[in-house]
Image (cartoon, rainbow, N blue to C red):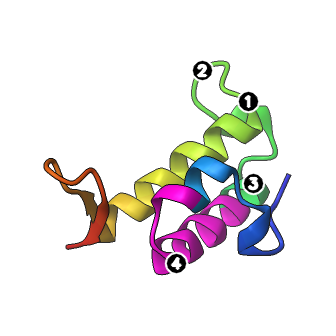
Amino acid sequence: MPYSKLTDLPESIRDNLPKHAQEIYKEAYNSAWDQYKDPDDRRGDASREETAHRVAWSAVKKDYDKDDKSGKWKRK
């Protein structure tokens, strides 16, 4: 289900991503949730939620990388 605010995001997202990355994640997730409501639009047997999470992570990774040493997400 879509997220209305950052505090609604999963704890693992809130605890690991900077605020801007969380905003990207939320917007991409919500957009994908709407876009992939029809199972025929998804790959394989992925659920709507799984697809939305994959799209959201992909959007975050366009602007952020996880630092190998610190393990923190940083803007590219």
In whole angstroms, how far apart are the C-alphas of marks 3 and 2? 16 Å
Of pointers 3 and 2, the one earlier in the residue sequence: 3
- Residue 48 appears in which quarter of the rendering? top right
Residue at point 53%, 51% (across, down): 55
For label 2, the residue is 44
- Left or right of residue 58: residue 10: right
Q: Do the residues labelled 1 and 4 touch (CB within 8 Å)?
A: no
Q: Nearer the viewer, mark 3 or mark 4?
A: 4
In whole angstroms, how far apart are the C-alphas of marks 4 and 2? 32 Å
Identified by mark 1, the residue type is: Ser
Q: Are marks 4 and 2 in contact (CB under 8 Å)?
A: no
For label 4, the residue is 19
For label 1, the residue is 47
Q: Which of marks 3 and 2 is in front?
A: 3
In whole angstroms, how far apart are the C-alphas of marks 2 and 1? 9 Å
In whole angstroms, how far apart are the C-alphas of marks 3 and 4? 21 Å
Q: Label 2's element? A: loop
- Left or right of residue 74: residue 41: right
- Left or right of residue 58: residue 45: right
Give residue 51's position: percent from left, percent from top.
63, 40
- Residue extent of the magenta highlight: 15-31
In the image, which disc is placed on residue 74?
A: none
Identified by mark 4, the residue type is: Lys
Q: Do the residues labelled 3 and 1 touch (CB within 8 Å)?
A: no
Crowding around mark 1 (Cα neighbors within 10 Å: few <14, some 14 to 19, many 20+) is some
For label 3, the residue is 33
Crowding around mark 2 (Cα neighbors within 10 Å: few <14, some 14 to 19, many 20+) is few
Identified by mark 3, the residue type is: Trp
Magenta span: predominant SS is helix
Residue at the far left: name it: 69
Residue at point 60%, 61% (across, down): 14
Q: Are marks 2 and 1 in contact (CB under 8 Å)?
A: no
